[in-house]
Image: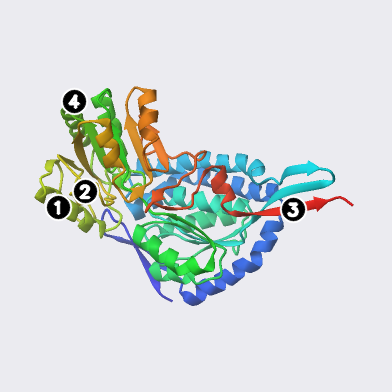
């Protein structure tokens, strides 16, 4: 049996070796999941909810150990690992509270002896190819509503977060979810490819645009449910009436939190010329105050880059930006020592000739561009093939509404950024993907609406 090596990206140390799946084991697990799904769906909703409530109890009980595991395999600062786990709890609560009314059978017509009803039935067996940057958030956005609605789940965690993926499986199984209903698959891209070959009823993926394209091509002819969250190049505009220091402090956190490795990280900033210089000065000052260091240290803000290959992406964007006239205010280089480290990097005088302002960075790097008007800012923000999130900073609600309404993005932020709510759908425009998770719509995504025409005799 092949082994998957797990490394600590902060040190380069090999911390575990896991038995990996292959095409044969993936196929066998898919067959077992298909056999087990009907019995799981036959349970009452209250019985399935009880299992997820017990899973929540397990997360609370083991939270510190789970945070340490996540930090060791992803390089996420330990405080942020705890934040993710603590932030998961209200998401679980939302799903448990919302599930009953969201999938309840609806009577939409009842006249003259004829009734019409809509029933929500599970898809069946779904495949989830998940991400490493927020393995609990991203995974559970799919796993929990899928299980609650009566599906079986074949779950492939990222090979960069496999230990965390196995912890999710352990807690679900301990909570009463049968092992053939929630099935982890361990391995790299070959295991993901093997999952796509199985006769599943839906594929839910979070990751790169390139991988999303391959998944769409692989399953497109089968007409199954497909959800792809493919990241973005999320813009924010700071208006001339905004407080430059307050906006800078907020956006520095939005750009650099989790070492810039968030799907909704702020990735490009446009600032009105009237406050541009004050904003840049406050932004650079804030970033220079972020501590880079051991992810296990309580005061570390910038941790390791999880994927070693991303260092090359960041280097290329820095080189390109410099060559095209951007002004480097801080950072712009790898940090010495073992592991994957990159200095927090801020460029001014950026523009759309630069990859920094057009292609996803997914690291602690940001470009800032000066604009002369709201109209210019909107045009630049929409000049992207991505459309995940976009934001505006201004004290004026009317101005914000007018600007945000023009933006091509699935989530819109006024005076905030880098925020996800379980009550709101998480979706994108363009190359940011198709489908959605979260909200009541993200629950219904795991069901089929079935129509009932009922005439009394």
Mark in the foreground, 2 or 4: 4
Query: Label 1, on which residue?
Result: 320
For label 1, the SS is helix
Query: Label 4, on which residue?
Result: 274
Whole-angstrom CA distance, mark 1 to mark 2, is 8 Å
For label 3, the SS is strand
Tag 4 near tag 1, CB within 8 Å: no
Mark in the foreground, 3 or 2: 3
Query: Label 3, on which residue?
Result: 452
Tag 3 near tag 1, CB within 8 Å: no
Whole-angstrom CA distance, mark 4 to mark 1, is 28 Å
Tag 1 near tag 2, CB within 8 Å: yes
On the picture, is 5 further left or further right than 270? right
Q: Determine the residue positioned at 24% across, 55% down.
A: 340
Is disc 2 surrounded by few (<14), some (14 to 19) or many (20+) residues within 10 Å? many
Whole-angstrom CA distance, mark 2 to mark 4, is 24 Å
First of labels 2, 4 by sequence position: 4
* Count of marks, rendered view: 4
Q: Determine the residue positioned at 62% across, 67% down.
A: 34
Mark in the foreground, 4 or 1: 4
Tag 3 near tag 2, CB within 8 Å: no
């Amino acid at each position: 049996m092949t082994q998957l090596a797990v490394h600590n990206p902060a040190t380069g140390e090999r911390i575990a070796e896991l038995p990996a799946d292959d095409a044969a084991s993936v196929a066998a697990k898919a067959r077992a999941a298909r056999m087990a799904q009907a019995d799981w769906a036959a349970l009452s909703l209250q019985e399935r909810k009880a299992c997820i409530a017990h899973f929540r109890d397990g997360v609370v009980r083991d939270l510190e150990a789970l945070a340490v595991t996540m930090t060791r395999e992803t390089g996420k600062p330990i405080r942020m690992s705890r934040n993710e786990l603590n932030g998961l709890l209200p998401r679980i609560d939302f799903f448990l509270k919302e599930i009953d009314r969201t999938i309840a059978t609806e009577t939409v017509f009842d006249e003259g002896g004829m009734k019409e009803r809509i029933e929500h039935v599970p898809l069946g067996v779904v495949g989830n190819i998940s991400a490493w940057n927020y393995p609990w958030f991203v995974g559970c956005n799919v796993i929990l509503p899928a299980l609650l609605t009566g599906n079986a789940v074949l779950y492939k965690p990222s090979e960069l977060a496999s230990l965390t993926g196995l912890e999710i499986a352990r807690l679900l199984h301990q909570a009463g979810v049968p092992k053939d209903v929630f099935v982890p698959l361990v391995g790299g891209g070959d295991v993901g490819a093997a999952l796509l070959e199985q006769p599943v009823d839906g594929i839910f993926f979070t990751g790169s645009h390139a991988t999303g394209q391959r998944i769409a091509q692989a399953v497109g002819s089968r007409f199954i449910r497909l959800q792809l969250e493919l990241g973005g190049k999320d813009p924010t505009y700071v208006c001339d009436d905004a407080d430059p220091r307050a906006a800078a402090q907020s956006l520095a956190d939005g750009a650099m939190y989790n070492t810039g490795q968030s799907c909704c990280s702020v990735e490009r900033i446009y600032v009105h010329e009237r406050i541009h210089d004050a904003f840049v000065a406050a932004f650079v000052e804030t970033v220079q105050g972020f501590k880079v260091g051991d992810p296990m240290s309580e005061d570390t803000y910038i941790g390791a880059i999880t994927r070693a290959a991303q260092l090359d992406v960041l280097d290329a964007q820095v080189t390109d930006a410099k060559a095209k006239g951007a002004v480097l205010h801080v950072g712009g280089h790898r940090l010495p020592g073992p592991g994957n480290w990159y200095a927090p990097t801020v460029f001014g005088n950026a523009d759309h000739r630069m990859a920094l302002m057009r292609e996803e960075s997914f690291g602690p790097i940001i470009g800032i561009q000066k604009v002369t008007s709201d109209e210019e800012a909107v045009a630049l923000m929409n000049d992207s093939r991505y459309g995940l999130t976009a934001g505006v900073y201004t004290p004026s609600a009317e101005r914000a509404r007018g600007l945000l309404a023009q933006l091509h993005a699935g989530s819109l932020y006024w005076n905030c950024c880098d925020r996800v709510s379980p009550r709101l759908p998480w979706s994108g425009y363009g190359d940011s993907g198709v489908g959605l998770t979260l909200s009541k719509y993200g629950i219904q995504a795991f069901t089929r609406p079935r129509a009932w025409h009922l005439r009394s005799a």
